[in-house]
Image (cartoon, coloured by chain):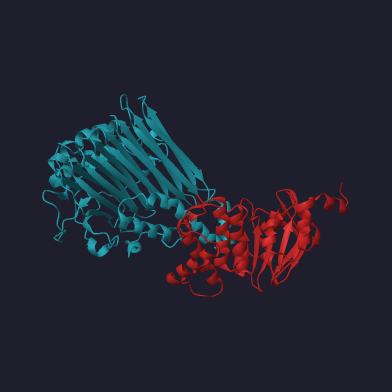
Chain colours: A red, B cyan
Amino acid sequence: MLEVKNLHARIGDKEILKGIDLVINDGETHAIMGPNGSGKSTLSAVLVGNPLYEVTEGEAYFNGKNLLEMKPEDRAHEGLFLSFQYPVEIPGVSMTNFMKAAINEKRKYQGLEPMNAAEFLKLMREKRKVVELDSKLANRSVNEGFSGGEKKRNEIFQMAMLEPKLSILDETDSGLDVDAMRIVAEGVNKLQTPETSCIVITHYDRLLEMIKPQFVHVLYKGKIVKTGGPELAVQIQEHGYDWIKEEIGEE
Amino acid sequence: MGSEQQYIDLYKQCRTMIHEHSSDVMNSVRDEAFERFASAGFPSRKVERYKYTDIQKLFAPDYGLNLNRLNIPVDPYKAFRCDVPNLSTSLYFVVNDGFYQDEKPKGHLPEGVIIGSLKAFATTAYYNQLAGKANDATTDLNTMLAQDGLYVYVPKNVKVDRAIQVINILRSDVDLMVNRRVLIVLEAGAELKMLFCDHAADDKNFLATQVIEAYVGENASLDLYCLEETHHKNVRVSNVYIDQQRDSRVNHNVITLHNGVTRNKLDLTFSGEGAECQCYGCVIADKHQHVDNNTLITHKVPHCTSNELYKYVLDDQAIGAFAGRVLVEHGAQKTSSQMTNQNLTATKEARMFTQPMLEIYADDVKCAHGSTVGQLNDAALFYMRQRGISLEEAKVLLQNAFINEVIDMMQLEPLRDRLHYLVEKRFRGELNKCKGCQLCK
């Protein structure tokens, strides 16, 4: 699915990723944890092609294709999806028009005809149920006036609509109450298939108890310094990151 | 000074001819206008209200004028099908600057309503009463040269349900200057919706001056829509004067989709208490297009409400200007006024000048103004691209969202739908020019 080799990236003059190696196979769920400022969000931004970041070294292949050479929209068409930590409000663009444009551009990329209106609305209805998204929200402008929880659910709704191969959830649990987190996690689990994979970026193991990852990576100062199973998340929750810092020879 | 001389000479030479082909009412104010024009000349850019448009330069070229009122052969019904679909309008044509007389049935107008040639119907009670006091050179020039135009009269308490659509057609085989004049009189309680669509039928240089005077009586209601879809060789200098009596309502909408150089001035005065106006402007310009909207709203009396929203989208090397002034005179208490100008510049070369002004001489009023100039939101663009929407499509969606805010304010629904459609096509680059109104087919 995804193969990242020695990835370096910076924003402005500041180098943030300092050699990331990561392999994700079909059907796997990986968690990425790490203290604030370690580069977790940067990694997700670089993978989806955010133009604010510049890749200075390394490679990334997505299903055999060179990810770093692709435009952000083409990465999406290939099946890469990012659930944003801070979903953007787009006043004046309705959710319906936004999703219609997204779906039809993907279909165009795949050489398919645009979806007809009835089919599209049916799809919207079905997928809304995945995250129990109110139909009123779907008629509003993208994220405008949504609460924090609604925004995150809306991200998973879009994921359901676009059926990506690899989804990156960037702190999708932040700002969610217990019920909302359960809805989001169940939504994500429903969308998982043996052919799809997921990267979950989080600070807490609570979400990981619900979306069970096979691998947990610790990102620190722009590098993956430790990889383990689900038990690693529990250890971090209990003991913080200091013991890992000690292990790698920091104070 | 300079470019006015040719108009001074022209008037001196052709005074008789101009008079012969017009009417007594229109002729009665001609000489005064000439005197004012000849002594003042065109304003330079040092004059505050003309800071952003070089009038001297626009009037410098030597255009032809049809002072002899030669009939220019045209069948507007064939040349133009600028129907805004689903809009059930009563359709009229003004060819260059003359009312187009034809025998086509006009649909039923309520009794007493007059829509016709200005030359035939204008009365001294109204003609040039607002424009004559405006102290504006391009208005005086229009008064001095205009020989005909459109007259609209709605009697007391008569409501004209169906919108009146007037297509202004510029049609000529040589470079041409036209001076169009419109007089609208709404008696107390009258209601009228008017839509002016400006088109250029020929690929010639046109200079069109326009003066619209509108008297809106007590409790009367006027919706005025001015839509310009001309081409890059077109210069438009429009001056609109509106006087509102007690409890009257005005909706003034000005939309520029295609043009060369456009200058739109609106002077609106509240003469009676409790009146209200909404002014909306929508501008889409690219290449070297230039659009300057200049408004002055005068609150002379208490308890009036004015609201302005102008939005521009500028691409390439386009230049936009908005200068709005709200004057709240001494004693105009309980005035409520809101002015907003928001602009999107898509390139580094596009330029926007914005100047919202409030001048308040009363102490119990609620007035606000604001303006913004910005670019498309990069975060939103990237968010959309991450969902697979191409950069081009994302831009179109965001530009549409931006401009739709003002289009959605417009009351005439079929026009609104049509504008949504035209604007989207415009953003996609599918409309490059209005040629024989192809774009409306």
Left or right of B99 on screen, residue B55: right
Left or right of A191 on screen, residue A217: right
Q: Which residue is depicted at the point 33% across and 62% down?
A: B440
In the displayed structure, B359 sits above or below B408; it is: above
Q: Which residue is depicted at the point 32% across and 40% down?
A: B266
Residue nearer the viewer, A216 or B248: A216
Of all residues shown, which one is farthest toward the front? A179
Residue nearer the viewer, B117 or B284: B284
The answer to whether one can see residue B190 in this image is yes
Q: Which residue is depicted at the point 29% across and 41% down?
A: B240
Q: Position of residue B226 (x, y in %)?
A: 31, 49
Residue nearer the viewer, B30 or B300: B300
The answer to whether one can see residue A6 in this image is no
Q: Position of residue B269 (x, y in %)?
A: 28, 34
Residue nearer the viewer, B91 or B221: B221
Image quarter of the N terminus of chain B? top left
Q: Position of residue B307 (x, y in %)?
A: 36, 40
Left or right of A119 on screen, residue A34: right
Q: Position of residue A25 (x, y in %)?
A: 72, 71
Image quarter of the C terminus of chain B? bottom left
- How many circles with numbers are drawn on the protein? 0
